[in-house]
Image (cartoon, rainbow, N blue to C red):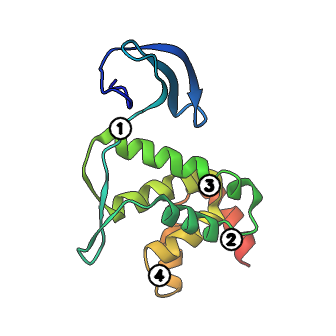
Amino acid sequence: MQCPACQNTDSRVLESRSADAGKSVRRRRECLNCDFRFTTYERVETIPITVIKRNGNKEIFNRNKILNGITRASEKISKISQKGELIVDDIEIQLQQKNLREVQSSDIGEMVLDHLKELSEVAYIRFASVYREFHGVNDFIETLETLNPEEKEQLASVIS
C-alpha cells in the first residue's frame, strides 16, 4: 500500500477490524519510511451488472427498484415487508455469483417471484400481476393454477 505522505510502498498493519457490517476490513497502517499513519479499507470488488429491459434498453442494476416492487406487493403483509432487504440481498448475491455482466429483467423478476411464492401467495400474485402485465381475470386464473392445491384454497378464500 502506497503511503499518502511519501509514496513509499512499504508499510505495516497496526490494526485490522471489520467495517460496514462485515462487508469491508479497516486497516490502520504505518509507513516504514516516514512513520506516517493512515487508514485503508479493503472491500470485495463486484462486477457492475447491466439489466436488459423488455424493450431492449439497458440500465445499471438498481436494488431499490426490486425492493420497491417487493414493498408494493407486500403492503400490509408484515412477514414479507421485514424480509424485503434479505430477498434483494439474496438476488444480488445470486447475480454476482453467476459472474454475468448482463442479465435480462425477466430473470430478475422470476427470482423475485420464486422468493415471494415461498413467503406469501398474496404478495406473489400482486407482484406477478404487475411483472407479467395481467390484462384480465384469465391472467390471474392462469397464475393461480400454478400454485399448489393448498395455496389455491388459501388464495381463493382471500379473493372471495
Instruction: Reply above or below: 8 against 89.
Output: above
- Which residue is painted at 30% across and 27% down in the image? 7
Quadrant of the rendered structure where residue 127 is? bottom right
Classify residue 113 as left or right of residue 77.
left
Contact (Cβ within 8 Å) of mark 1 with mark 4: no
User: Circle 2 sits on which residue?
Assistant: 156
Question: Mark 3 and mark 2 in contact (Cβ < 8 Å)?
Answer: no
First of labels 1, 4 by sequence position = 1
The residue carrying mark 1 is: 45
Mark 2 vs mark 4, CA separation in Å: 18 Å
The kind of residue tagged 1 is Glu
Q: Secondary structure at mark 1?
A: loop
Q: Kindly report the distance in space between the C-alpha atoms of the residues bearing marks 4 and 3.
A: 23 Å
Report x, y in % for residue 18: 58, 26
Q: Residues within 10 Å of mark 2 (few under 14, many from 20)?
A: few
Residue under pointer 4: 134
State whether residue 55 is above or below residue 66. Answer: below
Total label count? 4
